[in-house]
Image: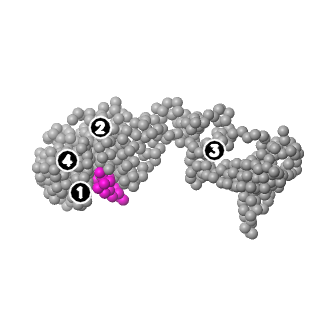
Amino acid sequence: MKKDQVILFDTTLRDGEQTPGVNLNENDKVKIALRLEKLGIDIIEAGFAAASPGDAKAVRAVAEAVHKPLVVSLARTNKNDIDEVVKAFKGITNVGIHIFIATSPIHRERKLGMTKQEVVDKAVESVAYASQFFDHIEFSCEDSTRTELEFLREISEKVIEAGATVLNFPDTVGYTTPEEYTELFQYILNHTRGIEKVILSCHCHDDLGLALSNSIAAMKAGALQIEGCINGIGERAGNVALEEVAALIETRSEHYQRKTGINLKEIAKTSNLVSRLTGISIPPNKAVVGGNAYAHSSGIHQDGVIKDKSTYEILKPESVGFSETKLVLGKLSGRHALKKRYEELGYHVDDQQLKEIFTKYKELTDRKKEIFDNDIIALLESEQPNEGTNYLSFQDVSLQVLNNKQYRAFVNINGKDQQVIEGIAKGNGPIDAIFNAIDTLINLDVELVDYKITSVSQGKDSLGEVFVKVSSGNSIFQGRGMDVDIIVASTTAYIDAINRIINVSETNEKVINGYEVKTT
């Protein structure tokens, strides 16, 4: 194997399944294993054969399903565990075993109740026994980062002599730092007899958020194998996320001078499958595969990405299997992002239109958490010029609930020269009261014919669009209003209908009580 090639060992089906609440059945494991094979994983740890007959069956099913990756099963340092692995893999080639025992003082004394010599003897005995059946034998010193370096050297030399082909030094509780982990691997490389016969491996947990940093430190110090899980799942805070390892090595290949066999374009599919089958959702801010990993909401960022994606993206979403960069429209988005989204939706917006729409857009973002395509389409359509003049425009509205289950509405409307006029009226409901209040301001005979509310987009804070039909004389007029607040939308819809009536009215004066309006 080339020294610049990093072996990726996936333990999603074993350590990942130890995530609280996760229980993968045989079919689930096979589905994930086949996806890991497409991803380009080198070694798949399919489970713990001795744990249960079901786990042993699943381990075998995975080994039968995949062809390229090496498949291994975990085993403790006892003959029964090893026999269960042998039985599970009987008749199948390209398989191996992963044997472990704890080596740190706290584990030796408090968990195992064993001396150093007893731990060494047990390890050597088990590795020697497994060597009768397997060419690939990985040996792990559980909790190695809290183990004396001299003892790690001692047990490493003995298991190498017994037939181990891979030495794994797990940071089982996520305790170490990159500097300390580097020191561990350098010490083993420089002081262990027979070290040239084996591959060094790291296995990092993320209890202190250092799993990725520690894995890369181990790689730089001489580890040729990195173990982890898809999406970083696993015991407690989880394992290092293998998709992050692969993406980092690929993105910074000139710096690390390393490579993997991973097909990055399969990352998104693999991540989504693991998430779905384990029931563990991917945090939106998760590196590489999170929903926000390639989303930009800041206006400054969006402007940069529109001009050149590399301004704010070091990893292309397409390179890891996602469709495209997302410009998330929100309160921090700028005009460039809004105009680009209109263009993507097939709408042409000139600079003047954009200026007018953007004002309403910013008002909307102050009241709505997420802006959808239908929201901005509705804003654009609401800006389309209507025939005639808008004599009246909405100022504000408030409601009072009365003891007799009626409502009192207070409606302020801007009239000529932005003069504010107020209408007050009661009604059997909030909308009835509002419309009655508006009626007090006009010298027109208006009757509501139809009233309809629709949701423009999705979510509880969706824009509501209200359509009203009113009759005046022998004609029917339609008005429309739109707002997050359905009361405001209803008010503006009724005012819109009144404006349309005024525009075609043959009466040139006093269509509004106490307020002179002249039609053109």
Q: Which residue is mark 4?
A: 95
Does label 4 or label 2 sit earlier along the sequence? 4
* Along the viewing direction, whichever of 204 and 421 lies nearer the viewer: 421
Give amino acid for label 3.
Answer: Ala
- Judging from the image, what secondary structure is the residue with disc 4 in? strand
What residue lies at 72% left-to-right and 60% top-to-bottom?
Answer: 430
Q: Which residue is mark 3?
A: 378
Q: Which residue is mark 2?
A: 261
What residue lies at 71% left-to-right and 52% top-to-bottom?
Answer: 468
Label 2, residues with CA under 10 Å away: few <14, some 14-19, many ≥20: some
Give amino acid for label 4.
Answer: Val
Percent position of residue 25, x then y: 31, 57
CA–CA distance between discs 1 and 2? 28 Å
Lateral position of residue 313 relative to residue 117, left or right: right
Percent position of residue 96, x then y: 19, 48
Label 1, residues with CA under 10 Å away: few <14, some 14-19, many ≥20: some
- Judging from the image, what secondary structure is the residue with disc 3 in? helix
Percent position of residue 21, x then y: 36, 59
Q: Which mark's residue is nearer the viewer, 3 or 2? A: 3
* Along the viewing direction, whichever of 456 and 55 lies nearer the viewer: 456
Give amino acid for label 2.
Answer: Gly
CA–CA distance between discs 4 and 3? 59 Å
Residue numbers of the magenta segment: 14-30
View extreme (bottom): residue: 404
Does label 3 or label 2 sit earlier along the sequence? 2
What residue lies at 29% left-to-right and 51% top-to-bottom?
Answer: 30
Q: Is residue 58 visible?
A: yes
Does label 1 or label 2 sit earlier along the sequence? 1
